[in-house]
Each structure stands twice: as C-alpha cells, then as structure tokens.
Image: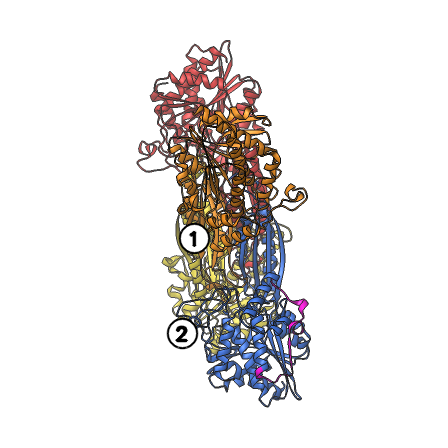
Chain colours: A yellow, B red, C orange, D blue
C-alpha cells in the first residue's frame, strides 16, 4: 500500500467510527480491503473469530441493530455483515508462509461514544473526514491501528518472511470487552510471539517505544440504585431518593484513599437518574471503573468502591444492584522482543528516537492476549508508535499525524520478519 | 353521561397517557366526545385556545412529533390533530345559556413520564386499560379530571343554568407549563367565577374539600455543567469533572436550610452526566425544582440553589449554565365560593363528609388562572373530590375509585348552577 | 423592687453567664437576692430542688469544678455553693399566702457557650456589663427571666394574693436538660396553674403574647465515629477515616427530606475529629439535634438521622457509637389561662399590643412542666414578653430592652393574683 | 554506652513524649546525658541552636508554658530549661577531632499528639515506660533517634575519627516545622557530609537501607471558615453554616483527582466546628496537608485544595481564611554516601540484610538539611535502620525492637569514621 492508500483507508474508517461490538462497517471494510489486497490463507469473522461466550459489555439489541443498519446504509457488504449479526464483530487474518514461528499482531478497531470537534482547526473537520456518525468518534487512533494491521499484512505477504502471521482485528477495546474473547479463541493458542501496538500516548511523530509496561488492571462496575418515588411537593418524606444515594456514592468514590503501593484510579464515567422534576427519583445508575497499577491495587479500589455503593444505598434506604463488567489484568513486555523492536526501529526511516521502555498509565485488554501467549511459553511486547496529536486521547480534538501510520507498518513488518529469523 | 360512559371514557384516556404538550390523542378524544355529546357554542383548540407565546417547558420537536405520530396511529382524528401541531394541545369549550355570570371550570389533562405498574393487583393492569404508552402514565388522575370536565358540560347543558360556562381543558400542568398560557389567553378575561378541581390528595371516596389552599409556589431550574474530558486512566488530572460538580450540587441542594416562615421543598428530579466509563465526564445536567409555601419562601430556596449550582461548578473548575424554567405562584380559595361548594356537596348523594378547607402541600399552575380571575375582581376556589387511591400520587400504582368521577360531575355541575343563582 | 433594682440585678447576672448545670454564681445570687428581699416560706436548692437522677446532659466533672471555682472567685456565697456541688443548680422558692390555688411560675437561668460581642454598639460592652466569663454569654435573655422571677415573688408577696406561689428557677434549658428533672420533682405535683415565660422572640417591647404554642419536639444525638489511624503520607490505605465518615454524615443529615406534615429541623451543632495533620483521623464526633413540630415529626427526622450515622460509618469502615441525649416533647397553652393573661396584659401600663397566640418555632423544656401540670388536671400557658433585641437570639449581639423586665413582672404578678381570684 | 544504657535512656525519653516545639524535658535530658558522657567541644541550645525566625507551626504560648511546667515537674534541669523558653527546643552538639571533614548527623526528637495503647500486649505498658504525658506518644521512634544520636557521639568520640562531627537534635519534625530553622542556622553551613536516619519504616530488625529516597513534598494548610450563627430551631434560614462548608470541603478534598505523573496525598487531619447543638455553627476549621512525589505534584494538589476551600465556603455563604503552614521539599540520597553506608552495614554484626535503596513514601523535613548541604557542594544520605514494630508508625501500638538501637549506633558511627577516611 502506498502512503496515500494508507491515508485514504484510515480516513474512511475515521468517518465511520463505531462503538464497541458495533464495528460492523469497520469489520466489513477491513474484510473488503484484505480480500482485494492480500493473498490470505484464512480470514475468520463473526463467531468464528472470537470466543463469543466471553464477550463483555455487549450493548442492547436495539443499539446493535441500529449500528448494523447504519453500516448497511453506508454501503458495507451485506454478506459480510450477516456473519457479524448480534455483535460478533472483529476478524482474524492468517498468512501462512512456510516453516517458522507463528507471530501474532493485535490491533483494536473500535471508536468512542463522543462527539467529534467540528471547528476548522480540527483536521478531520477541515478536510472532510470528520465522523459521519453523531455521538461517535475515533478519538483514540484505532482507525490508524486497523490501517496498520492491513498494511503489515500486505507488506509481510510480499517479504521473505517464513512462518505464520496472524493479525487480530479486535473489537471492543474501549469497554475492555473484546480482549478476553479474542484471547480465549483457538486462534491464539499456537501463537509464539505477540505484538500489540498503540499510536500516540504523548509520544511525538518519529518516536517509537519498544516495550510498553505499566498497564493498569481494570474493572468496570455498574450500580443501579432503586428507591421509592414520591411527589416532591406533596410528600417528599415518602420518597427513598436514588439520586441522593448516587450523589453520595460519587462523592465518596472519588475520595477512596490513595494507596502507598502504587497508582490507583477511579471514575464515575456515566451517571443518570430520575424521571421528572417533580418526582423524588426512584432510580439512578452509575457506570464506574477502577484501576490499579497491579491487580492487587485494582482490587483494593474495587472493594472500597463496593462498600461505597452499598452504604450510599443504605444511607437513603435504597437497594443497589451491583454488576461487575469488563476486567483486564496487568502485563509486562518481554525483554527479548523489546530488543528486536528497538533495533528494528532504530534503523527505520522517519524514526528518530527510540525508547526501550515506557509506562502506559492506562488500561488495555491487549493484556489478556499478552498473558495468554506468555502462559503458553511465548513472548509478547506492546509497541508505541509516536504520533503528533493536537488533542489528548479521548478528547474531541484528538487526531493523528498520518505519516506515523507508515512508521507503524514499517517497524512492525520488519520486526515480524526479524522475529522469524532470530526466533528468540 | 351514564356512570358507565364516564368510566369508559376515563379508561380510554388512561390507556393513552401523554406527557405535557403532547396531549394530542387526549385533546382529539375530548373534542370528539364533546362534539358528539354536547351542543357547544364554541370549541377552541390549538393556537386559538391558549396564548402560545407563554407556553413553558415545551419538549423538543422530536418528542412532539413522536407523540403526534402515536396519536395518529392510535386513531385520533387527523383534522383535529393538525390544529394541535407543534404542541398546541388543550381546548376551551364554551356553553352560552342566556343571561348570567360567566363561570369557568379548569381541568388538566396531561400525564406523567413514568412506567405504570403491571402486576395483577393494579386494577388498570388487571382490567386491561393499563398505559399503552411505554414510559407514560396517568399517575395523578388527570384522566378523571378530563372526564369530569366533559361530564359537567353535558350536565349543565341540560340543566336550568343561566349564564355562560367555559371549561378549560388545560395541558402541561405536570411541568407547570400550561397554566400561564391559558391564564393569558382571552378566554379567561371575562370569567367571573372560577372552579378548579383535583381528585384524591389522600381524601377517600365520599369526601369533598370545598376550598383547597396551601399551594406551594414553584420554580424549575435546569443546570448544565461543562468541564473538560480526559482519559480516566491516563490523565485523570487533566479532567474537569462535571459529574463531581453535579454530585456536590445534589448533596448541597437537599441540604439547603429549612426556613422558619413555612414549608419549602427542593428536588433534583432528573440528573445525568458523562459518556463512557473511561472518560472523566465533561458534561452533566440537573433538572431541579424548588418550592415554598409563599413566593418569598420559594425565592429563598431558589437563591440558595443558585448559589449551590455556581459554587459546585467552581469547586470542580467547571462552567454552569443555569436556566429558570416553569414557575407558578401561590393562591387562596375565596370564602364565598367555598360556602357554595360546601353546601352543594353536603347535599350530594355519595358524599358523606365535607371539609371546608385543606392544604394542598404541593404546587399547581391552576393558581395562574385563579389569580388572574381574582385580579379581575372575580372569585375562585379549588375543590378536592375524594377518591380512594391505592398508591400515592405520582407512583406506579396510583389509581382512582371510579365512583368518585360521578361525585365530581355532580358537585361541580350543581355548584355552577348555584353560583349562577346566588352570584356571590 | 424598683426599675433600677431590676436592671442592676439583671446586669449582674448578665456579667456572670454560666452554661447548663454550671449556674453556681447565678443560683447563689438568686438565693441571696430572695433572702434579702422576700419573706419566703421555703427555698429549696441543690438535690432538694430537682429530681437529680433525671438530669440530662450534665457536663464532665472538670467543667463543673471549673465553673464552681469561678463562682467562688466571683464572690458567690460559699455555703450556698456547697449545696449545689456536682451540678445541682437551680432553686424552687415557695410563698404561702393562705387559702387558694397553687400557682407555679417557671423561669430558666442558664447561658450559652458563645462569645459575646465586644464592640461599642453592643450595650453590655458599652456600659460595662459584658460577659466576664470568656466563651459564655446570656444570648437568650435568661438573665432577664431570673430577674423577673424574683420581681414577681416580691410583688406577689406584698399583694392581696391568696394561695401558694412557687417559682421554679430552672437550670439547663439550653441543653434541654433541666426541664425533666424539675418536672419530676415533688414540687410540681400540687401545682394547679403553671406559667412560663420568654422575653423577645422577635416581639418588640410593649407587645405581649398570652399563649405561645408551636413548640418543636427535640432530641439531641451524639455520634462518636471510630476508625483506624495511619500515617497519611506513608500508608493512607491503612486508615479507616473517621473524619470522612463525619463529613459524609453532616452532608446527608442536613439533606434529610422535608416532611409534608409540618416543620422539621436538623443541626450538626458541634463537630470535631482527628489529632494531627499527618495522621488519618481515627476519631470524630458530631453533636446534633433534630426537631419536629410534633413528636412524630421529630421521630421521623431522628430515625433518618440514625440511618445516616450508621451508613456514614459503614461507608468508611468505621464504627459509630450513637447516644441519645436530651429530649423535650411538644405542648399547648390552655385557653382559660391565655384569656386571663391577655386581659391582664391589655390593662398593664407600657403594654400596647396583646396577641392571643403565636408559635415558638423552637424547642423548650418548659413543655415537660406544662405537660406534667396538664396531666395532673391543671392548666398551663407560656407567655411571651416582647422586648426590642438588636441581635437575634443566640447571636453575639443579642440584648434585651430593660424596660420590658418591668412589663414581665407586672403582667405575671397580676396574672397570678387574677388566677387566684378566678380559679378557672 | 552499653546496650543497657541505650535502652534505659530510650525508655526514659519514651515515658516523656513531647510534641513539636515542646521538647523541653527531652532537650534537657539530652543535654544532661551528653554533658555526663561525652567530652564535647560545643553544645548549642535555645536560640543558639536554630534560626528561630524560620520556625514553623509553633504552638500557642499556653501550650508552650504547660509543657514547660510539666518538664520542670518531671525533674528537668532548670538552667537548661530557661534557655529553651518560648519553644526554642533542640540542640547541636559539636565534637572536634583534628583535621578532616565536617560530618553532620541529624536526629529528630519530637513525639506525636496521640494517646498510647495501655493494654498488656503493648511492651511500654507492660514494662512500665508507657507515656506519662496524656495525649502524647513516641509513636514514630524519635525516642530511639535521640538515643542513637547520643550513642554515636560517644562512640565516635572514643574512636580514631579525624575531623568534626556535629549532631543535630532537631525539634518539630512531626509538624514539618523544625527542619527549615535548623537548615538555616549557621551550624549547617560548613557540613560536608550529612547523614539522617529513621528506624522502622516496615523494615524488620537486622535490615538496613543505605539510601532512602522518595520523600514526598508537603504543605500544610489551615482553613478557618466563618459564617453566621442562628438559633437552629427558631431561624435556621438565618445561619450561614460553617460546618456544612467544612464537610463539603472534606468530601471534595479527598476527591481531588489522582495525577498520572506520580503519587499524591491529601489528609484532613484535624477538623472542628460549632459551639452548641442548638446553634447553627458559625465557625469551623480544617488542618490539612497535601503531598506529592515531586514539588510539582504537591503544588497540583495544593492548588486544587485551595479551590475546594474557597468554593466550599462560597457554597454556604461563609468566608474562609486560608493559611499555608509548614512545607518541606523532596530530596535524593547521594550514591557516594549510599555506597559507604551499604558497605559498612554489610559488615556490622546483627545486620543481616542491606538494601541499597528504598522509597520513604512519606515526608520528612530532613530534606531541608539534605538539600542545604547538597547546595553547598556536600553529600547527604538518609539511612533506614530496620526494627520490628508491632503497630504501624503513628498508631497507638507502635514500639521499637530495642536491639536495633545498637545497630543504628554502630552503622552510623562507623560510617562517619569511614567517611573521614574516604572523603568521597
């Protein structure tokens, strides 16, 4: 693929951002692109690509259908779409090139549920590839990731690589919901070496991080508070106020003590409650997440958060139904692969600075795949491809410097070839 | 109308509850019923019925259209509906019967945005007239009010009444949004005596309150908090958290000090905020209302609430946009009319207990109409028609004892006739 | 006593404010004054005056001793003081004047734990009788009450009154702690008519309220939170933070929903917690009070408050020890006495406006005595003696208009004489 | 000194814990011990030992005098005490032994304002040297530090050491108030090498840490809220509630977002407010501290905390007076000294494990002295001497294993001798 091809593909994906498990258009477009460009040996989609029973945080049927219909309307291939029905998005592409190790590359493909900036300083708006899907945006660069995955497949296919390459186009990273079902699928079982990647992360264009660590373990928690409604003017005393319970919980969630052993996080990312100004609210809901630098630290925050939810409910005589959502563990990049990436990157045109290691300081369900490979005796690393990004990750002005897409394709393709040679 | 007619009409209205300004089916059904039953002199609907520019809390166009379409689908008369388009619901029916005073009767017709109980103990569910409109319910008896309005028109039309009777079928009482535009319409200008009514209010079937006072003055407030999003794992310190601002506001709103001069109320009836578990929330919203036994008391709470919103925003470095919504004043029932109602009620079959006075302890925008009539030198009273109701007002198990509908028709019809005779 | 005598006595008491159960100087001064002015039949002090086992909210021994020593140093009579040791303050003075009913007058004598204003606009500061006791102040007029009690005794003693007069100089009203033990003493058992009084209450000089009602029932609650300390820098996660529990409780206490049946109150009047900036606080304490227009309403708030304390403790993994302190019921003034007071007051020089009834809107443990007398078949009323007061009750600039002291003496003395004549 | 001497001295100091700037007995005992045991060249106390104008967080005169009197009553030397009057505690001891570098050793001597455990499992209670000062306790091992300081002076004095040794007995570490004035005194100006030490820190007996880093920068903040009092029953609406402001602040302080760059801390260590259960609280106070792994991180929390204090005050219409108290920067141990300590420790009997580095994870104003020496071109390290401690630091059951006192004396004395030889 030429640089123009990469940009053009990335922009098309950018225009069609789809949230977790709704990547219908995205998957169809990936399939279409691969079929026309790469001589694959296998291409798995739908229930064949992932261990469906391990999917986490799948949206309601209504939402799935709505996004399905949008994908159809946007021109996605109907035959492909049918295989994805019910939220079985994502794909696994396999390239068999003779004797050699099995190398995996994992790229994530989903977008975020947020509005994209529309002002002229935001390049996608200025150049006409701003999100066409209201309320959704590629604000974390997964459009570039998917593009890199295709570029790598094409480049390795035409190289001297000897072995098997599997590229995992993983859905639902943003809800930490797709890593586990992909890790549990059969496709990962024979992978000897796994690479994952992320663009940006505050690294500028031209910088590469050979091994990212410091993944925060994460759990999502959803609390539903149920009280008793009452007329707010007539009989406020008869109410059991779920919104007061929710507000008490929010205040105390963020106030969970810091831990001396390392970083922790807590966020009440979505809240809602009540039905009318004049009714004492009977229902309220919090979708929260807790993180920790280690699994122990995450569990410390999670346990405290559960206590907060329960006692906030009790405070206002409400019930609370608490569900644990998606989870991801921590993981570490293996030194042997880090060395190869670092040495390849150092020789890649356009890359002017290579860092051996850096911390993510966030969470990622790539860790599920990394740990699975490591458990089977394999090696894994998580590579950072620097890209100038005007807004921060997850903000409405996030964008990538498209020249970095080529850096990603080059560094990863050559690393894969080199791994097949060195077999560390 | 026979008792069966009244029940049948009320049940049809009950099955089709529509929230404020969306009473398309309801208005069309009222029009239809009046045209077939009563020899009216005038029947105003749409922009002719109300002073449209004074409407408060009108929903978005999408919602209006959605309810319009539902009404159409439910079989409402299309010609009537067209006159109501854009949320011009409600009607004013006029009966001219020679010399005499102009007496007004105001009934409200809207429903609440809440789910109705579905269990067998709930009579509407058991007998098949539970709400057919998901998320909406006649949980405050306005289905009975509308029915009584029609019953009174029919009964007075066939009586010896001499004078003019106007029945105001008022939309949007629940959002305190319809009283003002109806009070500002020309129809009220020549009303000498005004009656308003409410069923229930914890008074059992057979009880009548001749004059209700103690209306709480009310203001609705809507606060939009805007902060700054950030990746909750990667850079929590970069966020300015609108949900924390909202929670701080909720906690402090309910904690506004009580006032020694009389009752006050505050409720954060609707809250929402955030977009994803892993994003520090950038937006949050509270729809609140404040009330007071007097306008001064309401303003005391409103001023404190505004302080709470502003400093909660400042606490978390957010902006807040504060809008004042619907308002209603307080009002008092006039003794001259109270005496007539009391004496009529005492002689009405089925009524076994008459209270001269009671307090509402809630708000009502009937006060706009009452004060307007009083300002013009007229008299007004707000009548309570007792009805056994299993659940409290605004709860999912609210229902009325249908025998009380007849009491309402009888007491009010005869009061109207008596007023025309006594002209107090 | 001349007007000058009354002023002089009141000013001496004002200079020596003493909090609940510490009224050593005050009691000794009352005893001294009575012995020199009135030919009493009995004068009870110490354990003879009250049912000591029913005392509520008695301070620690240290505080009692400290105030005892201050009284001694200020020149109080040592023999009298010895009878009061251990917090047995207050006195009951009895005047027997032949045949007739037993009339009681209850006056309270304690001060408040607050600093008095020192600026020149505050009369006690300008005229040299500001509190000599740091941190204590007569900010509710009980100095005037005690003075009126003595003035009434003297005036009735020299009148034609026939019957028995008992004046109850009650300690510890401000902590709602002295009413019960005085009501339970034998002295009240034979009282046929009881008068109580309060100056001010927003009524100006020259105004008298013949019967005050609307006493709020009250309960004091003391919550002690116990957690686990930890080094705030080294191991914040090891702490169980009692101050966070306390803050959560305070926020939710004030947010207990209003009640439609009538007025409620809640106040967290004293809070404290923690021991050093760098230790996660292990202890915290709240002294709160709840009130209600009826006992039921008070119990509603009390039950909710208890829930708040328990769940705030649980929220932060702390224990809470909850003690119920002083309590006082509600009470009503009897119409027969109200009429006599009103008619006497109307004829009293200096009184230019008489109100039959008004509401206190606060609490008072005079209700214990009133209800006890009423339970025994007697009658009671609580009289308001208007006085201009620059600052509100309980604030640092509170003061009384001393001309109203004479009004109090006159109205109450003549009411007592009239009661003996009318015997309603 | 024999092991028994060390234990006996430490136990005497343990029985007489004195808080910051009140170490009168402690200083006098140190002076006494030094004068009887060591042939010092200089011994500075009182204003001669520290730069008095830089003292931070000095208590009120009342408290100073109270502790002064206790020291006198406990038998402290009166002549020494007089030099310390007004809170000029601490001492600097100088030993000149010919040519060579100037080596400093800093030990802190103050105790904590907390009650000591009294149960039999707590060794000081069981063996009769539990705190004799109610409400104060050596819960952080500074009794052992002072003892080690004396032991080192004695041991170095009788060794072959060539150079000058200065031991800084620093007051007021627990309030981060004594480091700065000791760093600013002339005594530190010519120090070439500085050692500081701490026992315990979760390291068991036999373990030594040669260089501790990870000091958190710290600032103390004191917020005084002032509102308006009111009678809580009579006119709650007239109050401006300082306790509500305080509670709102506490809830939001702990909820300041975590920072991705590193550890932060916040603690509301002391709170108080209000004066009586029935008065809406007019005053409240928070003594808080904020920390950060770097000075920037500390300032991030401090700025957010200031915003919290200001907007919590505004929320409840109160004023807030905010004072910044003691501060301490971060610091790093120098590798050259770390090596010497590590090598000496490895050869010290009783020491069975040596760690090169560890993080404190807390704050320490030894950093002031370390940075001052480093700024002058010298070297510094902060040494950890392991000791088994049953309770955590700052808790009521903290105690030290007294065998570790000898380890401290040996490691530090021999390090000082070795530094004079190596002069790194």
Q: Secondary structure at mark 1?
A: helix
Q: Locate residue B382, reporting x and y percent.
A: 47, 23
The magenta-colored residue range is D36-60
Q: Quadrant of the N terminus of chain B?
A: top left
- Label for residue B169? none
Q: Locate residue D344, reporting x and y percent.
A: 53, 85
Residue C283 in view (yes/no): yes
Q: Find the residue positioned furthest to the bottom.
A: D160
Q: Is residue D42 magenta?
A: yes
Q: Which residue is mark 1?
A: A309
Chain name for mark 2: A
Neighbour tally class for label 2: few under 14, some 14-19, many 20 plus, Cα within 10 Å: few
Q: Which residue is mark 2?
A: A377
Residue at mark 2 to residue at mark 1: CA–CA distance? 40 Å
Identify which residue, B372 or A220, lies in the foreground: B372
- Residue at point 31% right, 35% down? B121
* Image side of residue D287 versus residue A169, left or right: right
């Amino acid at each position: 693929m030429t640089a123009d091809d990469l940009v053009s593909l990335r922009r098309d994906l950018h225009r069609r951002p789809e949230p977790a498990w709704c990547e219908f258009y995205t998957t169809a477009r990936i399939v279409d692109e691969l079929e026309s460009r790469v001589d694959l040996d296998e291409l798995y989609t739908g229930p064949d690509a992932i261990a469906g029973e391990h999917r986490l945080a799948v949206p309601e049927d209504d939402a799935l259908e709505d996004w399905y219909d949008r994908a159809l309307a946007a021109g996605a291939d109907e035959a492909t779409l049918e295989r994805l029905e019910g939220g079985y998005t994502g794909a696994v592409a396999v390239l068999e090139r003779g004797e050699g190790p099995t190398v995996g590359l994992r790229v994530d493909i989903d977008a975020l549920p947020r509005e994209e900036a529309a002002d002229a300083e935001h390049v996608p708006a200025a150049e006409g590839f701003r999100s066409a899907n209201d309320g959704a945006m590629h604000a974390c660069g997964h459009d570039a990731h998917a593009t890199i995955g295709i570029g790598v497949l094409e480049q390795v296919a035409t190289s001297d690589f000897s072995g098997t390459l599997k590229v995992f186009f993983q859905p639902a990273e943003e809800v930490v919901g797709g890593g586990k079902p992909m890790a549990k699928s059969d496709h990962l079982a024979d992978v000897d070496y796994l690479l994952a990647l992320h663009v940006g992360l505050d690294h500028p264009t031209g910088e590469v991080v050979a091994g990212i660590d410091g993944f925060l373990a994460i759990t999502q928690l959803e609390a539903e508070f149920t009280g008793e409604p009452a007329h707010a003017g007539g009989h406020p005393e008869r109410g059991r106020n779920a919104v007061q319970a929710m507000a008490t919980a929010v205040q105390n969630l963020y106030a969970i003590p810091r831990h001396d052993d390392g970083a922790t996080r807590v966020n009440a990312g979505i809240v809602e409650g009540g039905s009318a100004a004049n009714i004492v609210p009977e229902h309220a809901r919090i979708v929260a997440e807790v993180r920790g630098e280690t699994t122990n630290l995450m569990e410390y925050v999670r346990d405290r958060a559960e206590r907060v939810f329960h006692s906030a409910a009790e405070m206002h005589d409400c019930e609370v139904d608490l569900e644990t959502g998606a989870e991801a563990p921590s993981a570490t990049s293996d030194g042997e692969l880090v060395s190869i990436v670092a040495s390849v990157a150092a020789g890649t045109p356009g890359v002017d600075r290579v860092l051996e290691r850096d911390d993510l300081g966030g969470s990622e369900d790539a860790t599920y795949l990394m740990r699975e490979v490591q458990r089977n005796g394999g090696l894994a690393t998580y590579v950072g491809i620097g890209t100038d990004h005007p807004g921060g990750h997850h903000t409405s002005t996030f964008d990538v410097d498209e020249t970095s897409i080529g850096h990603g394709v080059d560094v990863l393709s050559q690393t894969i070839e080199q791994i097949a040679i060195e077999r560390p």
